[in-house]
Image (cartoon, grey):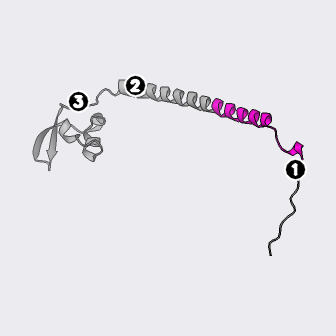
Amino acid sequence: PTHHLPQQKKSRADVPDAETTSDSITDVVSHLHNLLQTKEKELKEREADFDRRVKSFESTHPSIGSDNDVIQLNVGGQTNIAVLRNTLTQFEDSMLAAKFSGRWDDSMEK
């Protein structure tokens, strides 16, 4: 057996009118727009700060190598091999590329 709950009739006062609903939607959209603008401004400020830090780092660590640099490799302690940096770094995500990108030149034994 299905039991039906008695439905309560809504009075006219319980139903928001179109103008009130429209105003509420407008308020929410306006709030979200302002929030988005605030977040976008914060993001731009953080991006500008990051760019300043990168420039500062690059100015104090100018030793990033050139693709045409010749690197002398000591292989096994006896054999020296001369190789172009771009040969070692041609696969950007490889361990060799990370090691020989030039970023760590100051800390490597020469």
Q: Position of residue 23 (x, y in %)?
A: 76, 32
User: Mark 2 is on which residue type?
Assistant: Lys
User: Looking at the image, is mark 3 or mark 2 earlier in the sequence?
Assistant: 2
Residue 50 to residue 2: above or below: above
**Answer yes or no: do the residues labelled 2 and 1 have beta carbons within 8 Å?**
no
Q: Position of residue 108 (x, y in %)?
A: 26, 39
**Answer yes or no: do the residues labelled 3 and 1 have beta carbons within 8 Å?**
no
Between tags 2 and 1, which lies in front? 1
**Stretch of the chain drawn in magenta:** 10-34
When asked about the image quadrant of residue 91, the answer is: top left
| Majority secondary structure of magenta residues | helix
For marks 3 and 1, give the CA distance.
Answer: 77 Å
Q: Which residue is mark 2?
A: 55
- 10 Å crowding of disc 1: few (<14), some (14-19), many (20+): few
Q: Residue furthest bottom?
A: 1
The N terminus sits in image quarter: bottom right
Q: How many marks?
A: 3
Q: Is residue 16 magenta?
A: yes
Residue drawn at point x = 49 percent, y = 29 percent = 47
Q: Position of residue 19 (x, y in %)?
A: 79, 33
Q: Which residue is mark 3?
A: 66
Q: Which residue is mark 1?
A: 10
Dot 1 falls on a residue whose secondary structure is loop
User: Mark 1 is on which residue type?
Assistant: Lys
Residue drawn at point x = 82 percent, y = 41 percent = 16
